Image (cartoon, grey):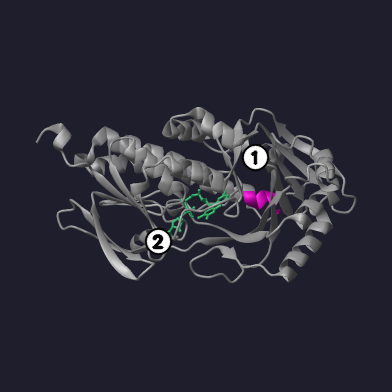
């Protein structure tokens, strides 16, 4: 058969979040056909979905190459060129700098903006919304994989064949569970309250004047504030939004089996504000108070997997490496997974699928494993939790080793992302 008549290799991607859309770009750009199955009924709209995330320089380059226009990402994000850690004394509300790195080079994106940017640049016919993955089977000769999905609008089932099944179905991945039924996520010991304050039309309010006085580099700085047994994250997003996170040590909350987000009540928000008032400067508490619909995520990760592909099935993104958020790795690892998978498939072709997947695994596993463990370590330091052979971190009494560990640039393999 002539080359141009050859059947295109086909991947079925389960999950249409950042891993799914990134992988769709990486694979269509090497000439593969893709079908993305996403259980959510429709594309996310507006900024009510998700909050902020930080993109490292390599992710910025990859996304720009997929979009074909570097301006688009620049226009949808704000710079994060400073990584700063500050200590706050809860009693006096006095704050002082611990570390400041002026060469950070990340960009701040809103999850929904990034998703929209990537999704809108894909051909519309590759996406199947409202399709819930149910099961898969691999042909006896391992030449193809058959995926069964449920159409949520009418409860019908469909079957789709492909050469490769990509599990981009997140940290609670059903596909991973098929291969690793005993794997459990590990609760970190703390939850993250999160919110995005929309200050459009309120630039001159007391709240905004106050927060800009207390955090003068908003708009280019990733602020970490460290209190006793707690920390916060604060940075600005495009279109007059402030993204904040407040980590609280607490027993594991009861959550639905298929989610790591807990439903919040007014009482829970009041409690969170009272807790914030004990430690944080009033300017930051005011931002938290004025934020509409803050939400809470229980923070999980898991010990690094030993394997991330089996026959014609491969894991990417949070399915391959659930992680805590402290190293800003989750989305960045996901984007690089997709790019590396694309490169390996391009190099070896579908006829050498297992060699390609082996190379993907041997390239990504050593990096993501170290980054997940480092993020875990960073979270335990910043939350003042017990660590082997080390006193719990106290922001009022820091060692040079503490100050080194706090900085984002000391993440393993940080340089490859630059
Ligand atoms: C709606 C949403 C908002 C988010 N907002 C933020 C944010 O603001 N900041 C941040 O840092 N991270 C956010 N995240 C998480 C972030 O996307 C991930 O941590 C990271 O980018 C890795 O992405 P992922 O695609 O591997 O996993 P996820 O983003 O968790 O995506 C997994 C996807 O798989 C789909 N899925 C799961 N099971 C099935 C199934 N059986 N059939 C079909 N589809 C299935 C889910 O609906 C989901 O869309 C958000 C995730 C989602 C889904």
Q: Which residue in the protein does label 1 denote?
A: 238
Q: Can the viewer see residue 371? A: no
Magenta: main secondary structure: helix
Q: Residue 156: where, in percent of width, then height?
A: 31, 69
Rounded to the nearest whole Å, what is the CA distance between mark 1 and mark 2?
Answer: 30 Å
Q: What's the residue at 29%, 48% (across, down)?
A: 11
Figure check: 319 above or below 80: below
**Which is more N-terminal, label 2 or label 1?**
2
Nearer to us in this view, 150 or 376 = 150
| Label 2 secondary element | loop
Residue at 39%, 43% in the rendered image = 23
Does the segment drawn in magenta span residue 382?
yes
Tell me where residue 148 appears, x and y as whole percent. Answer: 28, 63
Task: Tell me the tag on residue 130.
Answer: 2
Residue 405 shows in the view: yes
Residue segment shown in magenta: 379-384
Q: Residue at x 38, y 40 (%)?
A: 25
Seen from the viewer's position, the closer of residues 117 and 8 is 117
């Amino acid at each position: 058969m002539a080359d141009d008549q050859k059947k295109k290799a086909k991947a079925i991607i389960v999950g249409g979040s950042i891993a799914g859309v990134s992988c769709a770009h990486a694979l269509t750009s090497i000439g593969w056909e893709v079908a993305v199955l996403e259980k959510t009924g429709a594309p996310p709209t507006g900024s009510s979905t998700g909050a902020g995330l930080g993109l490292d320089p390599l992710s910025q380059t990859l996304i720009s190459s997929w979009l074909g226009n570097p301006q688009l990402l620049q226009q949808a994000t704000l710079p994060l060129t400073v990584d700063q850690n500050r200590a706050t004394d809860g009693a006096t509300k006095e704050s002082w700098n611990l570390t400041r790195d002026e060469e950070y080079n990340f960009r701040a994106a809103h999850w929904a903006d990034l998703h929209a940017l990537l999704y809108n640049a894909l051909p519309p016919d590759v996406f199947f919304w409202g399709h819930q993955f149910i099961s898969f089977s691999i042909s006896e000769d391992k030449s193809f994989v058959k995926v069964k999905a449920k159409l949520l609008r009418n409860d019908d089932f469909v079957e789709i064949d492909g050469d490769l099944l990509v599990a981009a179905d997140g940290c609670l991945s059903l596909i991973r569970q098929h291969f690793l039924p005993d794997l459990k996520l590990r609760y970190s010991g703390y939850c993250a309250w999160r919110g995005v304050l929309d200050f459009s039309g309120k630039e001159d309010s007391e709240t905004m004047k106050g927060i800009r006085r207390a955090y003068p580099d908003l708009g280019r700085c990733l602020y970490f504030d460290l209190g006793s047994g707690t920390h916060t994250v604060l940075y600005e997003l495009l279109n007059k939004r402030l993204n904040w996170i407040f980590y609280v040590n607490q027993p594991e909350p009861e959550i639905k089996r298929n989610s790591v987000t807990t439903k919040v009540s007014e009482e829970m928000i009041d409690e969170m504000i009272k807790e914030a008032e004990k430690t944080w400067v009033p300017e930051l508490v005011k931002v938290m108070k004025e934020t509409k619909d803050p939400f809470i995520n229980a923070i999980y990760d898991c010990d690094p997997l030993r394997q991330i592909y089996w026959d014609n099935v491969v894991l990417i993104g949070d399915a391959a490496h659930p992680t805590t958020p402290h190293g800003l790795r989750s989305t960045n690892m996901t984007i690089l997974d997709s790019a590396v998978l694309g490169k390996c498939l391009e190099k070896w072709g579908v006829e050498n699928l297992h060699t390609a997947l082996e190379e993907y695994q041997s390239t990504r596993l050593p990096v993501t494993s170290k980054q997940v463990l480092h993020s875990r370590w960073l979270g335990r330091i910043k939350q003042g939790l017990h660590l082997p052979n080390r006193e719990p971190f106290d922001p009022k009494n820091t060692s040079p080793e503490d100050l080194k560990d706090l900085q984002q640039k000391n993440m393993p393999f940080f340089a490859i992302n630059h």
